[in-house]
Amino acid sequence: MDERQPVRHTFGKQERLTGRDRVKLVATTGKTVKLFPFRLSGLFMPLDTKAAAQVAFAVPKRHVKLAVDRNRVRRHMREAYRLNKHRWHAQLEGRQCAWLLIFQGPGPLPWSEASGKITRIFDRWTQEHAGVDR
């Protein structure tokens, strides 16, 4: 009965970064990593949840005009984060972190390209700012 349970890839309500003040704090004072067309800002801070990290996703109307395209980009961002977050949470070493992922490209990317870039930008942020050399 030592079978390992598969990792459940979820993205619950407690993992969402909410509140105008918190999002603004992360955006203005957080440490930033850029990988076109994404920008990731993160800040180590105490969160009012047991989750290792909270994250918000932004797709400005300035860059992506159509709402259906903004929704698609946000959906891709959430899905890529949901599938890979266990790697980054493990690297936080018990600290809590708030992230803001912003899309700054001219239009939606194909899923494979968006997923790869999101994975790379989170990997880069955790390597540079979480103090973990991998």
Image (tube, helix red, strand yellow):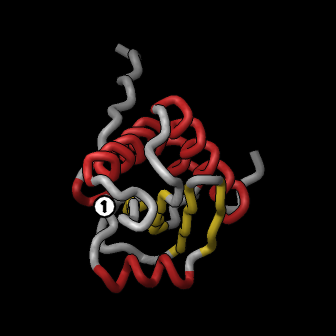
**Callout 1, which amino acid?**
Arg
Q: Eyeballing the image, is 7 above or below 91? A: above
> Which residue is rendered at x = 49% and y = 77% of the image?
27
Lateral position of residue 108 relative to residue 21, left or right: right
Percent from the top left, x then y, of residue 74?
Answer: 35, 50
Q: Which residue is mark 1?
A: 16
Which residue is at 41% across, 21% downward?
Answer: 4
Residue 122 in the image: above or below residue 62: above
Q: On the rendered structure, is 32 left or right of 28? A: right
Provide residue 84's location: percent of width, then percent of height.
Answer: 48, 39
Q: Residue furthest left?
A: 13
Which residue is depicted at the point 53% across and 54% down? 105
Q: Farthest residue in the right direction?
A: 133
Which image quadrant: the C terminus? top right
Q: Position of residue 78 (x, y in %)?
A: 37, 46
Q: Nearer the viewer, residue 36 or 66?
A: 66
- How far across and how far down the image is residue 48, in percent? 30, 74
Classify 115 as above or below 58. Answer: above
Quadrant of the image containing the N terminus: top left
Res 117 quadrant in image: top right
Give the residue furthest to the front: 65
- Give the quadrant of residue 42: bottom right
- Taking depth in this image into account, of 3 and 78 the one nearest to the observer is 78
Q: Residue at x 37, y 24 (%)?
A: 6
The count of marks equals: 1
Question: Callout 1: helix, strand or loop?
Answer: loop
On screen, residue 42 versus residue 100, left or right, reads right
Q: Is residue 47 above or below residue 33?
A: below
